Amino acid sequence: MRLIIFLAVLGICIASLAVYMRRTPVGSLSGPTLLQSDAIVSSPTPEPQVPFVHYEPPELPVKKAYRIILLGDSMTAALGPYADELRLVVKKKYPDVDLIIENQSAPSSNVESLQDRLLTKATEANATYEPVLGKPFDIIVIESFGYNPLSHLGRTEGIDKANESLFTTMRLLNREQPSALVVFLATIAPSHTMYGVGAVELDLAARESWASERDQYIENHIAFAKEHNIPLVDIYNQTKDKTGSGVLKYINPTDHIHPSQLGVNFIQDKLAQYFIDAKLFE
């Protein structure tokens, strides 16, 4: 008899619970429900930033035409917008190869601007530059930007910031243009005794200080390339005299900052010689 009563009570409870569940809106139940779980859309996982450690220069395929980007400050801008003389020097060795050279070097730009130059459109000195990574290229030559140091940061912090920018640049190039060859360029050395004569009023101590700061950035560019296996065209050490000062014949006598015509010729000849010696187009 007790068993019958227990079963009857249990049946009534189950029936009551079923009626309650049918009448209660899903949203009023406590805790997560199936509908709530289905409504969650997982956000994509951000692409991990692979740190740059060591560069492995790619081997360029044999082609009839190569696109080359020059990226630096006014020291490299001096080669002209299409570096015509550089192209002609290489053409003598490889008459059947077409070089499309775009000199995107901007006067007064510094190494900290590298990431923006790669990714965004820029306007420098009344000229507009498209993002370097906006279309493919075969070779990119990155100059030291040493003549526009980050003086406002002080030398130690400025060099740290320069290295940070170079690390970011190499990481971006490895990720976005892994088949393109990256080459570092160390430009002509500054004169310690004549730096800026004709362009800026400085006493001898200030000239030496300004020149040595530019030396430091160019030398850091060289050290970064050597440490990370980046191909390097070292014009800097080939344009210094025995005292470590820049040889004046390579420096513009009007402002004693920018390259003279002989200096421009020296830069483009050494770049061309690197392309030839490395057999990049064979």
Image (spheres, rainbow, N blue to C red):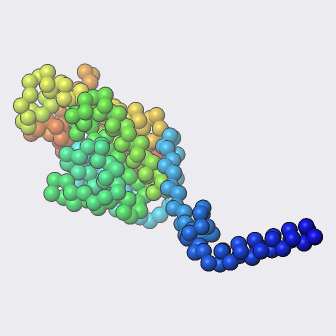
How far from the left and from the top, in percent, is residue 149? 24, 36
Q: Nearer the viewer, residue 231 or 205?
A: 205
- Name the side, left or right, on which 11 lies relative to 137: right
Residue 91 seen by the camera: no
Is the residue 61 above or below the residue 256 in the image?
below
Q: Quadrant of residue 32?
A: bottom right
How far from the left and from the top, in percent, is residue 175? 48, 54
Q: Nearer the viewer, residue 81 or 208?
A: 208
- Name the side, left or right, on which 188 lies relative to 20: left
Residue at the extreme front: 1
> At 46% across and 34% down in the image, what residue appears?
227
Q: Quadrant of residue 146?
A: top left
How far from the left and from the top, in percent, is residue 48? 51, 51
> At 39% across and 47% down in the image, what residue appears?
169
How far from the left and from the top, in percent, is residue 110? 26, 43
**Which part of the image, by quadrant, shows the N terminus?**
bottom right
Q: Nearer the viewer, residue 242 or 4?
A: 4
Is the residue 139 above or below the residue 167 in the image?
below
Is the residue 146 above or below the residue 87 in the image?
above
> At 49% across and 44% down in the image, what residue appears?
51
Residue 208 seen by the camera: yes
- Name the side, left or right, on which 194 lies relative to 109: left
